[in-house]
Image (cartoon, helix red, strand yellow):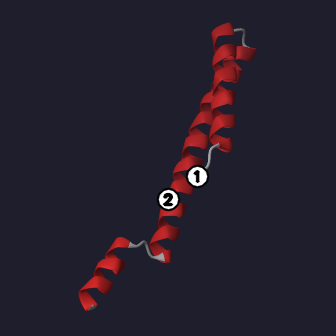
Amino acid sequence: MKAAGQVADWSTTSQDEADRNRGRALREREERLGKLSRQRDKAAEKCRNGDSEQCQRAQILDHEIEAEMNAPY
């Protein structure tokens, strides 16, 4: 019986571990959003300076940011 209980402990995720994993996932998501936002801002600046390719890139990055914001974490 004791061995079976130990196996159950090893195979389940503790609340502390689950919290750590969720925190890690949230930090990674925030890092991705920050990177995409910086890229979008640079593209938007170049767009304002007349680079039409960067206007398209800014729009694509906006869509990527929106998708990341709507994705479950």
Residue 57 visible to the viewer: yes
> Which residue is farthest right?
48
Residue 10 drawn at (x, y percent)? 32, 75
SS at badge 1: loop
On the question of residue 51 being in view, the answer is no
Neighbourhood count class around disc 1 (C-alpha, 10 Å): few under 14, some 14–19, many 20 upward: few
Tell me what residue is drawn at x 52 percent, y 69 percent: 19
Q: Secondary structure at mark 2?
A: helix
Which residue, given by chain and number where applicable, does mark 1 sit on?
73
Q: Nearer the viewer, mark 1 or mark 2?
A: 1
Point out the tag, 1 or 2, that comes first from the N-terminus: 2
In this rendered view, identify the residue nearer to me: 21 or 57: 21
Location of the N terminus by quadrant is bottom left
Instruction: Identify the residue shown where x is 69% and y is 29%.
Output: 62
Q: Position of residue 59 (x, y in %)?
A: 70, 21
Quarter of the image holding residue 4?
Answer: bottom left
Along the line of sight, which residue is nearer the eye, 53 or 6? 6
Q: CA distance from mark 1 to mark 2?
A: 10 Å
| Local crowd size for mark 2, using a 10 Å CA cut-off: few (<14), some (14–19), many (≥20) | few
Amino acid type, residue under disc 2 in the picture: Arg
Number of disc labels = 2
What residue occupies the far front of the structure in this picture? 1
The amino acid sitting under disc 1 is Tyr
Name the disc covering residue 5, or none.
none
Q: Residue at x 55, y 42 (%)?
A: 32
Q: Is residue 14 above or below residue 24?
A: below
Residue name at image x 69 percent, y 36 percent:
66
Contact check, label 1 and label 2, Cβ < 8 Å: no
Observer-nearest of 19 and 33: 19
Residue hosting label 2: 24
Give the x, y percent position of residue 2: 27, 91
